[in-house]
Image (cartoon, rainbow, N blue to C red):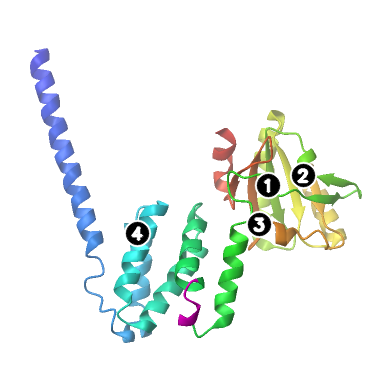
Amino acid sequence: MNQILTILLLFATAILLAQTDKREYAHYNQTKHFFDNIDFTDRQLLNTPILEQKMGFYFRQMVPPLVDSIKARVNQVLEKSRANEEMYQWVIRYLYQFYRESPVPGNTEVYNFIGEQFIINEPNRWNDGAFVEKVRDRVAKAKLNPVGTPATNLKLQTLEGKTVDLYSIEAPKTILYFFNPGCEACHAVTEKLFKIYQQYKPKGIQVFAVYVDRKKDEWVNYTSAKGLDWVNVYDPTGTKGIEQKYDIYAIPMIYVLDQDKKVIAKDLPVEKLEECLKE
Protein backbone atom coordinates (compact mmCIF):
# COMPACT_ATOMS: atom_id res chain seq x y z
CA MET A 1 0.00 0.00 0.00
CA ASN A 2 2.80 2.40 0.95
CA GLN A 3 4.55 1.59 -2.34
CA ILE A 4 1.42 2.48 -4.32
CA LEU A 5 1.05 5.76 -2.46
CA THR A 6 4.70 6.57 -3.14
CA ILE A 7 4.27 5.88 -6.86
CA LEU A 8 1.11 8.04 -6.98
CA LEU A 9 2.90 10.85 -5.16
CA LEU A 10 5.83 10.70 -7.55
CA PHE A 11 3.43 10.69 -10.51
CA ALA A 12 1.54 13.72 -9.16
CA THR A 13 4.81 15.54 -8.51
CA ALA A 14 5.98 14.82 -12.06
CA ILE A 15 2.72 16.25 -13.46
CA LEU A 16 3.03 19.34 -11.28
CA LEU A 17 6.63 19.92 -12.36
CA ALA A 18 5.69 19.48 -16.00
CA GLN A 19 2.90 22.03 -15.64
CA THR A 20 5.27 24.43 -13.87
CA ASP A 21 7.84 24.02 -16.65
CA LYS A 22 5.12 24.73 -19.23
CA ARG A 23 4.05 27.90 -17.44
CA GLU A 24 7.65 29.08 -17.08
CA TYR A 25 8.35 28.39 -20.75
CA ALA A 26 5.14 30.19 -21.78
CA HIS A 27 6.10 33.21 -19.66
CA TYR A 28 9.64 33.20 -21.05
CA ASN A 29 8.34 32.97 -24.60
CA GLN A 30 5.79 35.72 -24.05
CA THR A 31 8.43 37.96 -22.48
CA LYS A 32 10.90 37.29 -25.29
CA HIS A 33 8.39 38.22 -28.02
CA PHE A 34 6.49 40.94 -26.13
CA PHE A 35 7.68 43.76 -28.41
CA ASP A 36 7.60 41.82 -31.69
CA ASN A 37 4.62 43.83 -32.95
CA ILE A 38 6.25 47.17 -32.15
CA ASP A 39 8.05 48.88 -35.01
CA PHE A 40 10.78 50.82 -33.24
CA THR A 41 11.69 52.58 -36.48
CA ASP A 42 8.30 54.32 -36.52
CA ARG A 43 8.61 57.52 -34.48
CA GLN A 44 4.86 58.09 -34.94
CA LEU A 45 4.41 55.73 -32.00
CA LEU A 46 5.66 58.54 -29.79
CA ASN A 47 2.49 60.48 -30.64
CA THR A 48 0.26 57.73 -29.22
CA PRO A 49 -0.05 56.17 -25.74
CA ILE A 50 0.54 52.65 -27.12
CA LEU A 51 4.29 52.41 -26.53
CA GLU A 52 4.16 54.00 -23.08
CA GLN A 53 1.36 51.66 -21.98
CA LYS A 54 3.15 48.62 -23.35
CA MET A 55 6.44 49.59 -21.70
CA GLY A 56 4.70 50.19 -18.37
CA PHE A 57 2.93 46.83 -18.42
CA TYR A 58 6.07 44.97 -19.46
CA PHE A 59 8.33 46.35 -16.74
CA ARG A 60 5.63 46.23 -14.03
CA GLN A 61 4.10 42.83 -14.80
CA MET A 62 6.42 40.79 -17.00
CA VAL A 63 9.92 41.48 -15.70
CA PRO A 64 10.93 39.82 -12.39
CA PRO A 65 11.70 42.50 -9.75
CA LEU A 66 15.36 41.50 -9.56
CA VAL A 67 18.11 43.97 -10.43
CA ASP A 68 19.98 41.67 -12.82
CA SER A 69 16.77 40.62 -14.59
CA ILE A 70 15.67 44.24 -14.96
CA LYS A 71 19.06 45.29 -16.34
CA ALA A 72 18.98 42.47 -18.88
CA ARG A 73 15.48 43.45 -20.07
CA VAL A 74 16.46 47.14 -20.22
CA ASN A 75 19.40 46.23 -22.46
CA GLN A 76 17.17 44.12 -24.73
CA VAL A 77 14.54 46.82 -25.17
CA LEU A 78 17.15 49.52 -25.78
CA GLU A 79 18.85 47.34 -28.37
CA LYS A 80 15.54 47.11 -30.26
CA SER A 81 14.95 50.86 -30.02
CA ARG A 82 18.38 51.75 -31.47
CA ALA A 83 16.76 51.43 -34.90
CA ASN A 84 15.57 55.02 -34.49
CA GLU A 85 17.56 57.66 -32.61
CA GLU A 86 14.53 59.61 -31.45
CA MET A 87 12.85 56.43 -30.26
CA TYR A 88 16.05 55.32 -28.53
CA GLN A 89 16.31 58.56 -26.56
CA TRP A 90 12.63 58.41 -25.63
CA VAL A 91 12.97 54.85 -24.28
CA ILE A 92 16.06 55.79 -22.24
CA ARG A 93 14.29 58.78 -20.71
CA TYR A 94 11.17 56.72 -20.03
CA LEU A 95 13.02 53.87 -18.31
CA TYR A 96 15.24 56.22 -16.31
CA GLN A 97 12.21 58.12 -15.00
CA PHE A 98 10.18 54.92 -14.54
CA TYR A 99 12.72 53.43 -12.13
CA ARG A 100 13.63 56.83 -10.69
CA GLU A 101 10.06 57.23 -9.45
CA SER A 102 9.51 53.63 -8.38
CA PRO A 103 9.26 53.08 -4.59
CA VAL A 104 10.64 49.55 -4.78
CA PRO A 105 13.95 49.16 -2.88
CA GLY A 106 16.76 48.22 -5.24
CA ASN A 107 15.50 50.34 -8.10
CA THR A 108 18.12 52.95 -7.24
CA GLU A 109 20.70 50.58 -8.69
CA VAL A 110 18.61 50.25 -11.85
CA TYR A 111 18.18 53.96 -12.58
CA ASN A 112 21.83 54.57 -11.71
CA PHE A 113 22.73 51.91 -14.26
CA ILE A 114 20.54 53.54 -16.92
CA GLY A 115 21.78 57.03 -16.04
CA GLU A 116 25.46 56.11 -16.17
CA GLN A 117 25.48 53.72 -19.12
CA PHE A 118 23.12 55.48 -21.50
CA ILE A 119 23.08 59.16 -20.47
CA ILE A 120 26.27 60.19 -18.63
CA ASN A 121 28.51 57.96 -20.76
CA GLU A 122 26.89 59.19 -23.98
CA PRO A 123 26.71 62.99 -23.44
CA ASN A 124 27.15 63.82 -27.13
CA ARG A 125 23.98 61.91 -27.98
CA TRP A 126 21.85 64.35 -25.98
CA ASN A 127 21.08 67.80 -27.24
CA ASP A 128 20.18 68.72 -23.68
CA GLY A 129 23.17 69.52 -21.48
CA ALA A 130 20.96 70.47 -18.54
CA PHE A 131 19.33 67.03 -18.60
CA VAL A 132 22.68 65.23 -18.64
CA GLU A 133 24.00 67.33 -15.74
CA LYS A 134 20.81 66.74 -13.78
CA VAL A 135 21.20 62.98 -14.22
CA ARG A 136 24.91 63.21 -13.33
CA ASP A 137 24.05 65.01 -10.08
CA ARG A 138 21.21 62.58 -9.30
CA VAL A 139 23.41 59.52 -9.82
CA ALA A 140 26.19 60.99 -7.67
CA LYS A 141 23.76 61.71 -4.82
CA ALA A 142 22.15 58.28 -5.11
CA LYS A 143 25.55 56.76 -4.33
CA LEU A 144 25.73 58.52 -0.97
CA ASN A 145 25.40 56.24 2.08
CA PRO A 146 24.83 52.96 0.24
CA VAL A 147 23.50 49.96 2.15
CA GLY A 148 26.26 48.20 4.06
CA THR A 149 28.40 51.30 4.70
CA PRO A 150 28.66 53.54 7.80
CA ALA A 151 26.13 56.37 7.65
CA THR A 152 27.53 59.89 7.36
CA ASN A 153 27.46 61.51 10.78
CA LEU A 154 25.11 64.41 11.51
CA LYS A 155 25.50 66.91 14.34
CA LEU A 156 22.26 68.85 14.64
CA GLN A 157 20.31 70.91 17.13
CA THR A 158 17.37 69.76 19.25
CA LEU A 159 14.21 71.67 20.12
CA GLU A 160 15.97 72.85 23.28
CA GLY A 161 19.05 74.09 21.41
CA LYS A 162 21.33 71.21 22.39
CA THR A 163 23.65 69.71 19.74
CA VAL A 164 23.17 65.98 19.26
CA ASP A 165 25.47 63.67 17.35
CA LEU A 166 23.81 60.88 15.32
CA TYR A 167 26.57 58.51 16.43
CA SER A 168 25.82 59.28 20.09
CA ILE A 169 22.45 57.53 19.79
CA GLU A 170 22.73 54.17 21.51
CA ALA A 171 20.22 51.76 20.00
CA PRO A 172 20.20 48.32 18.37
CA LYS A 173 18.66 50.07 15.37
CA THR A 174 18.21 53.76 14.62
CA ILE A 175 15.58 55.06 12.22
CA LEU A 176 16.92 58.13 10.45
CA TYR A 177 13.88 60.10 9.32
CA PHE A 178 13.97 63.20 7.09
CA PHE A 179 10.67 65.11 7.04
CA ASN A 180 8.90 68.45 7.11
CA PRO A 181 5.57 69.24 8.86
CA GLY A 182 4.71 71.45 5.89
CA CYS A 183 4.87 68.44 3.56
CA GLU A 184 1.45 66.82 3.00
CA ALA A 185 2.99 63.45 2.14
CA CYS A 186 4.88 63.47 5.45
CA HIS A 187 1.80 63.56 7.69
CA ALA A 188 0.55 60.01 7.08
CA VAL A 189 4.09 58.58 7.13
CA THR A 190 4.91 60.37 10.38
CA GLU A 191 1.78 58.95 12.02
CA LYS A 192 2.58 55.39 10.89
CA LEU A 193 6.22 55.77 11.89
CA PHE A 194 5.28 57.07 15.34
CA LYS A 195 3.02 54.06 15.97
CA ILE A 196 5.86 51.72 14.99
CA TYR A 197 8.27 53.69 17.19
CA GLN A 198 5.94 53.37 20.19
CA GLN A 199 5.71 49.63 19.61
CA TYR A 200 9.48 49.12 19.30
CA LYS A 201 10.67 51.77 21.76
CA PRO A 202 10.69 49.26 24.68
CA LYS A 203 13.13 47.18 22.58
CA GLY A 204 15.54 50.10 22.38
CA ILE A 205 14.71 51.30 18.87
CA GLN A 206 15.28 55.04 18.43
CA VAL A 207 14.26 57.61 15.83
CA PHE A 208 16.57 60.47 14.79
CA ALA A 209 14.03 62.75 13.10
CA VAL A 210 15.60 65.48 10.98
CA TYR A 211 13.45 68.51 10.18
CA VAL A 212 14.76 69.70 6.81
CA ASP A 213 13.51 73.31 7.02
CA ARG A 214 14.29 76.15 9.46
CA LYS A 215 10.83 77.43 10.50
CA LYS A 216 11.32 76.58 14.14
CA ASP A 217 7.90 77.64 15.47
CA GLU A 218 6.06 75.47 12.95
CA TRP A 219 8.31 72.52 13.80
CA VAL A 220 7.99 72.99 17.58
CA ASN A 221 4.20 73.25 17.40
CA TYR A 222 3.94 70.15 15.22
CA THR A 223 6.14 67.91 17.36
CA SER A 224 4.38 69.09 20.50
CA ALA A 225 0.87 68.58 19.09
CA LYS A 226 1.74 65.07 17.85
CA GLY A 227 3.64 64.12 21.00
CA LEU A 228 6.72 63.10 19.02
CA ASP A 229 9.05 62.18 21.87
CA TRP A 230 11.84 60.74 19.72
CA VAL A 231 15.07 62.65 18.98
CA ASN A 232 13.97 65.78 17.08
CA VAL A 233 16.76 67.77 15.40
CA TYR A 234 17.33 70.39 12.70
CA ASP A 235 19.95 72.69 11.20
CA PRO A 236 19.01 76.23 12.33
CA THR A 237 21.70 77.92 10.22
CA GLY A 238 21.51 75.75 7.11
CA THR A 239 25.27 75.25 7.18
CA LYS A 240 25.48 71.54 8.06
CA GLY A 241 25.08 70.39 4.45
CA ILE A 242 22.42 67.77 5.15
CA GLU A 243 21.36 67.53 1.50
CA GLN A 244 24.98 67.22 0.41
CA LYS A 245 25.54 64.37 2.87
CA TYR A 246 22.34 62.43 2.21
CA ASP A 247 20.33 61.61 -0.87
CA ILE A 248 17.12 63.38 0.10
CA TYR A 249 15.60 63.66 -3.37
CA ALA A 250 12.12 63.56 -1.84
CA ILE A 251 10.56 63.64 1.59
CA PRO A 252 9.64 61.86 3.70
CA MET A 253 12.75 59.69 3.58
CA ILE A 254 13.57 56.76 5.88
CA TYR A 255 16.96 55.14 6.52
CA VAL A 256 17.54 52.31 8.99
CA LEU A 257 20.91 51.99 10.73
CA ASP A 258 22.29 49.15 12.86
CA GLN A 259 23.87 49.57 16.30
CA ASP A 260 27.15 50.71 14.71
CA LYS A 261 25.29 53.18 12.46
CA LYS A 262 25.85 51.10 9.35
CA VAL A 263 23.09 51.54 6.75
CA ILE A 264 20.69 48.58 6.68
CA ALA A 265 18.11 50.18 4.41
CA LYS A 266 17.65 53.50 2.61
CA ASP A 267 14.63 55.16 1.05
CA LEU A 268 12.52 52.54 2.82
CA PRO A 269 8.70 52.74 2.54
CA VAL A 270 7.17 53.00 6.01
CA GLU A 271 5.02 49.97 5.16
CA LYS A 272 8.18 47.82 5.08
CA LEU A 273 9.77 49.28 8.19
CA GLU A 274 8.49 46.69 10.67
CA GLU A 275 9.77 43.88 8.47
CA CYS A 276 13.21 45.52 8.53
CA LEU A 277 13.15 46.00 12.29
CA LYS A 278 12.22 42.36 12.91
CA GLU A 279 15.11 40.98 10.88
Residue 137 sits above or below residue 24 on the image = below
Residue type at the position of mark 4: Ala
Disc 1, SS: loop
Residue at horizontal 63 percent and vertical 56 percent from the top:
144
Instruction: State the image coordinates of residue 267 (x, y, percent, origin top left).
Output: 59, 53
Q: CA distance from mark 4 to mark 1?
A: 31 Å
Disc 2 + disc 4, Cβ < 8 Å: no
Q: Which residues are magenta?
A: 121-125
Disc 1 + disc 2, Cβ < 8 Å: yes
Q: CA distance from mark 2 to mark 4?
A: 39 Å
Q: Is residue 27 magenta?
A: no
Q: Which residue is mark 1?
A: 151
Instruction: State the image coordinates of residue 14 (x, y, percent, origin top left).
Output: 13, 33
Count numbered badges in the picture.
Answer: 4
User: Which of the numbered marks, if any, corresponds to residue 252?
Assistant: 3
Q: Which residue is mark 4?
A: 72
Residue 107 visible in the displayed image: yes
